[in-house]
Amino acid sequence: MLAPSFWGKIFHGELAQAIALVAYGNRFLHDSGQGPAPELWGSNSTVRNLQVLRFTDADQFAFARDAILLTPQNQTAPWFQDLSQRQARRLLLYVVRGTLKHGLPEIVATAFAGSNRWIIQADFQDRFELWVPSWLPPGLEEKGWSVAYRRQIVEKPVIKPPESLDSYEKELMDAIRANRDFASKALHERKGPPDGLGYFIKMFEKALGLANSADPEPSYPDMIPQTGYPVRSRRLIAVASNAWVFGGMSWWNDIFFNDESCQDEHSRLVAQLYNAVIEDLLAGTNSFETQFSSVGAR
């Protein structure tokens, strides 16, 4: 098995993009008088590989030539500005958990591009909007994917900000340590592929090392703005994004061992880690410092 050390960014690109839209949007909504709305197109790594970026209503065929766009194509600033003018209070990240219609387990499904699992919720005074991504793969002469975030109006929120980060921090660190220790033991006992085990041990160590960093850097360094998030939230996002080891062939969830009990323990630990990473990315992203006082107080 070849370890995926030659791949580009390890973290999930579509999820990184949703996090960036939420994070930069919250920074602007908090103080829209600070300057122009942030333009991520052409400058932020989370949208660098896109061919088309659109914001439409849910009743539109998102990629039709005559689709009615809510804001100009291939720009984020007008979308942020529109949310501010309509007095959006905040943006929150929501992840649809469980098995979707294609029937693949959630961890396996993350290996495939084009998921509508990563959703943005916009909170207003008397209503809520869900911006659900629809993805289109590139054509023969195109270089990047196209995505349209389609607006749905809902009466009740699907997610709320966390009241504290304490439990999320502990669960994530415990899960990373447990997976690292398991990989180290399996490597020592020669129960799995040495190259793959060694690679993921290094990944786990890197993620753990960010837990006490004064300037923690996510897998996509510009995924969240430099201001607006307390260091605890930044650490949580950095640790979780650097502990992303899930995908298809050769990823941590795809490693096979020559011992049945070892394989069973691996499956349990992978599920524990995946759940902790997802929940902590949600908690960190949804804990913009001005939303409540309990987070970041320490």
Image (spheres, grey):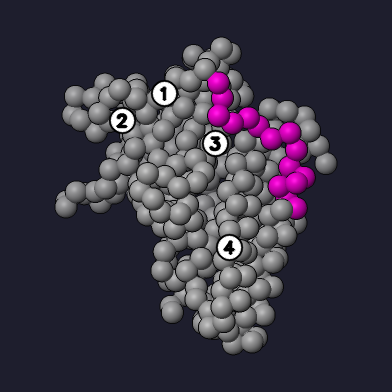
SS at mark 1 in the image: strand
Q: Residues within 10 Å of mark 3 (few under 14, many from 20)?
A: many
The tag earlier along the polypeptide, 3 or 4, is 3
Gap in angstroms between the C-alphas marked 3 and 4: 23 Å
Which mark's residue is nearer the viewer, 3 or 2?
Answer: 3
Q: Could you tell me which quadrant the C terminus lies in?
A: top right
Find residue 84 and report its horizontal and vertical position in percent: 51, 19
Q: First in sequence: mark 4 or mark 1?
A: 1
Residue 72 included in the magenta stretch of the image: no
Evaluate whether residue 37 shows in this view.
no
- Which residue is the site of mark 3? 93
Residue highlighted by disc 2: 73
Q: Which residue occupies the extreme right position in the image?
A: 298
Q: CA distance from mark 3 to mark 2?
A: 22 Å
Tell me which label, 2 or 4, sits earlier in the chain: 2
- State the residue in front, 8 or 160: 160
Residue at label 1? Answer: 152
Residue 223 in the figure: left or right of residue 43: right
Q: Which residue is mark 4?
A: 270
Between the C-alphas of marks 4 and 1, the distance is 33 Å
- What amino acid is found at the position of numbered circle 4 in the picture? Val
- Where disc 2 sits, the SS reads loop
Indicate the amino acid at tag 1.
Answer: Gln
On the picture, is 149 further left or further right than 201? left
Q: Please tell me how crowded label 2 is: few (under 14), some (14-19), or many (20+) other residues with Cα within 10 Å.
A: some
Amino acid at dot 2: Gln
Q: Residues within 10 Å of mark 4 (few under 14, many from 20)?
A: many
Residue 244 seen in the current view: yes
Q: Which mark is residue 65?
A: none
Q: In the drawing, does residue 127 fall left or right of residue 142?
A: right
